[in-house]
Amino acid sequence: MTTQPPADTAPTQGAALEARDLRQTYGTLTALSGVSLRVMPGEVVAVTGPSGSGKSTLLHLLGGLDVPQSGEVWWAGERVDTLDTQVRATRRAGRIGLVFQHHYLLEDLNVLDNVLIPSRLAGTRDEARARDLLARVGLGGREDSLPGVLSGGERQRVAVARALAARPAVVLADEPTGSLDRNNAHAVAELLVGLARQERAGVLLVTHDDRLAAFADRTLHLLDGQFTDSVPAFL
Ligand code: ADP
Ligand code: MG
């Protein structure tokens, strides 16, 4: 008689981000019904799907902003959905970069101080790196500007610099160019993906725009809370 080995709870070796069988409901509505994915360092993965398919719910769970009703989230080899909220927030600052459609810059902090937020929270305040990232996104010399004087594209480039400032394992971006015109959208996506690849950070790029998905190494399609990729083409 053979015995079952214990369930393998170890994460994939070297993964920047891993999610297993995430499920989330809001009342009677099932927003996610069993989603698993993995992002390796330096890998760019796009998640596309129509409005309401669960993209933002997924990103919130992956970023630890919400916890799943069931399933697991791992950041750089550590399971985080079971951590205390405060501990998870500190871990997030050092391991996860976040870029949203609307930039969430703090309007009364200058550009440099906005970029420094994650590394301050992570306890590694690194001003030289923040300045370097600002130069690499084309905003060298704008460190002292307040966000209010910047254009939409410039604000989103500040958000990209901020997302990478604390050397995260992975950047999670939810419709990062959704509020920009076509040219700015292309430029910001190219910057985000280019910098992340240089830094060996993974990227999970959530978008309903197929042009953005073209920047990714692979694309996962979400429909009604599930990835469709395992569904045969004839269905
Ligand atoms: P997407 O980002 O792909 O548009 P969402 O993840 O925002 O999709 O939403 C997935 C589904 O879950 C939608 O039907 C949406 O109405 C619902 N939903 C999302 N967030 C909430 C919430 N906080 N409360 C109730 N329903 C929600
Ligand atoms: Mg959304």
Image: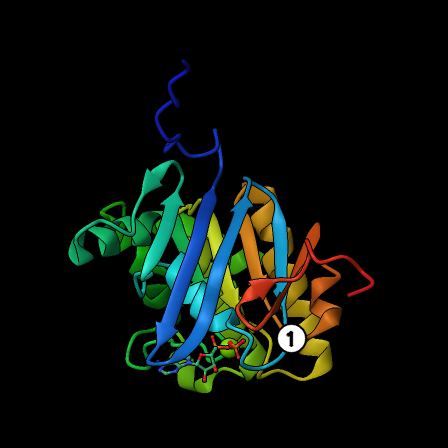
Q: Can residue 99 be seen in this view?
A: no
- At 46% from the left and 45% from the top, the residue drawn is 18
- Left or right of residue 54, residue 128 in this image: left
Q: In which quarter of the image is residue 211?
A: bottom right
1 versus 27 height, above or below:
above
Q: Residue at x 55, y 53 (%)?
A: 203
Residue position for label 1: 208
Q: Residue furthest front?
A: 1
Residue appearing at x 68%, y 61% in the figure: 190
- Secondary structure state at the residue bearing disc 1: loop
Left or right placement of residue 15 versus residue 210 in this view: left
The x and y percentages for residue 159 are 46, 68
The quarter of the picture where residue 40 lies is: top right
Name which residue type carries label 1: His
Q: Is mark 1 within 8 Å of ligand 1?
A: yes
Q: Residue furthest top?
A: 1
Is 154 in front, or is 47? 47
Residue 70, position as x, y percentages in the image: 34, 56
Residue 169 visible to an observer of this rendering: yes
Q: Is residue 193 above or below residue 138?
A: above
